[in-house]
Amino acid sequence: MQTKVQKYVVATVDEIPPGKRKIVNAGGRSIGVFNVNGEFFALRNRCPHGGAPLCEGVLSGFVQSRDRGNYSYSRKGEILRCPWHQWEFDVKTGQSWFDPVKTRVRTYEAKVEAGCSLAEHAGTEMREGPYIAETFPVSLEKDYIVIEIES
C-alpha cells in the first residue's frame, strides 16, 4: 500500500517565536508546533498515558548535578511536561523520559518553506481558454511552517 503525504501550512515563522508554541488542527489531528531555538518541531497533542492535551503542558529543561551543590540547567525549552500527570517528553523526538523504551508521543516533520515555493506547488491545473481577466502582481514574502502527515 502506498502512503500519501499531505502538507498542511500551519503558521508563518513569525507567529511562533523561539520558546513558544502553537496548537493547530491538521488532518483531523490536534498538533502542537514548537519553536526550539529557531527549529520547529511538531507533536501530537495527546499524552499516550492518559489522553491529556499534552502540548498545553509546561516547557522546561533538565537540572543536572555532577556533585553536591553544583547544578547545571540544560536543554531549556526542549522537555514538555504533561499537564495531568507530569510525564515528560522530548519535544524534538517524542521520547518519554518516564518510560523511554516503550512510551513516546507521535511526532510530525515540521519544515520551513518560502511562500513562493508553496504557491508553485499548490496543485492548481492551468487550462487554456478564452478567459480574460485583470491581473495584479502578487508576492509571498513570508516563510511558512509546514507539517507533513502520512495517511
Image: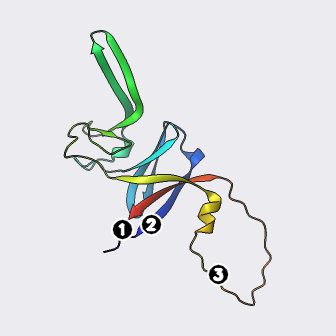
Seen from the viewer's position, the closer of residues 68 and 24 is 68
Q: Do the residues labelled 2 and 1 touch (CB within 8 Å)?
A: yes
Give the side of residue 69 with respect to residue 139, left or right: left
Point out residue 113 in the picture as x, y percentages from the top left corner: 57, 55
Q: In which quarter of the image is residue 150?
A: bottom left
Q: What residue type is labelled 2?
A: Gln
Crowd class of label 3 (few under 14; some 14 to 19; many from 20; radius 10 Å): few
Secondary structure beneath dot 3 equals: loop
Read off the residue under disc 1.
151
Query: Which residue occupies 30% across, 49% down?
Result: 105
Q: Quadrant of residue 83?
A: top left
Q: Do the residues labelled 3 and 2 touch (CB within 8 Å)?
A: no
Position of the C terminus by quadrant:
bottom left
Read off the residue under disc 2.
6
Point out residue 119 in the picture as x, y percentages from the top left corner: 62, 66
* Mark 2–mark 1 distance (CA, rounded to whole Å): 7 Å
Query: Which residue occupies 78% across, 84% down?
Result: 132
In the picture as drawn, the residue positioned furthest to the front comes out as 2
Q: Quadrant of residue 75?
A: top left
Q: Which colour scheme is used?
A: rainbow
Position of the N terminus by quadrant:
bottom left
Read off the residue under disc 3.
126
Does label 3 or label 2 sit earlier along the sequence? Answer: 2
Query: Which residue occupies 31% across, 9% down?
Result: 69
Q: What residue type is labelled 1?
A: Ser
Q: Which amino acid does label 3 sit on?
A: Met
Give the side of residue 54 with respect to residue 119, left or right: left
Does label 3 or label 1 sit earlier along the sequence? Answer: 3
* Mark 3–mark 2 distance (CA, rounded to whole Å): 21 Å
